[in-house]
Image (cartoon, rainbow, N blue to C red):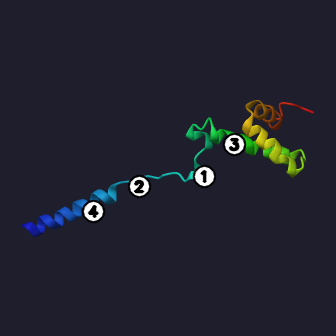
Amino acid sequence: MSGYLARLKVIETENIFCNTPERQVPKVPEVPFDTFGTSTQGQIEKNILLIQSWLYQIGEPEEDHDLVLDNCRNDPDAMEYFLRHARGEYKS
């Protein structure tokens, strides 16, 4: 009888694990950036990338990019000013 119970136990274990659905975990690039609630460093870097993209679009020399981006990292008012330009809120 113990051989039968051992086989039954193996079959039950296999059925439990085989019928359990696999949990799908999204890859990091698939997770929206805002999901993490990063109102600080993550949001700052996202804004820096937006401003940098805008600097390329307007033809600003690359040697000046670091000056603008460093200023934005250290001064929230500068960040807001350049973000408004990058978003097209100021028209020249």
Q: What's the distance in space between the residues labelled 1 and 4, CA to CA?
A: 34 Å
> Is 61 left, or right, of 31 in this rendering?
right
Which residue in the structure is indicated by mark 1? Answer: 29
Q: Helix, strand, or loop for circle 3?
A: helix
Q: Residues within 10 Å of mark 1 (few under 14, many from 20)?
A: few
Residue 14's tag is: 4
Question: In the rendered structure, which disc, 4 or 3, sits on the residue that comes first in sequence?
Answer: 4
**Tag 4 and tag 2, C-beta contact below 8 Å:** no
- The amino acid sitting under disc 3 is Lys
Q: Helix, strand, or loop for circle 4?
A: helix
**Tag 1 and tag 2, C-beta contact below 8 Å:** no
Percent x, y of residue 22: 41, 55
Percent x, y of residue 74: 73, 37
Say which quarter of the image contains residue 90: top right
> Is 5 left, or right, of 62 in this rendering?
left
Percent x, y of residue 21: 38, 54
**Closest to the observer, 8 or 46:** 46
Residue 22's tag is: 2
Q: What's the distance in space between the residues labelled 3 and 2, CA to CA?
A: 33 Å
The answer to whether residue 51 of the structure is visible from this angle is no
Residue 46's tag is: 3
Q: What's the distance in space between the residues labelled 4 and 2, CA to CA?
A: 15 Å
Percent x, y of residue 59: 90, 48
Residue farthest to the left, as pictured: 1
19 is higher (above) or lower (below) than 88: below
Please give the count of numbered marks on the rendered protein.
4
Q: Nearer the viewer, mark 3 or mark 2?
A: 3
- The amino acid sitting under disc 2 is Glu
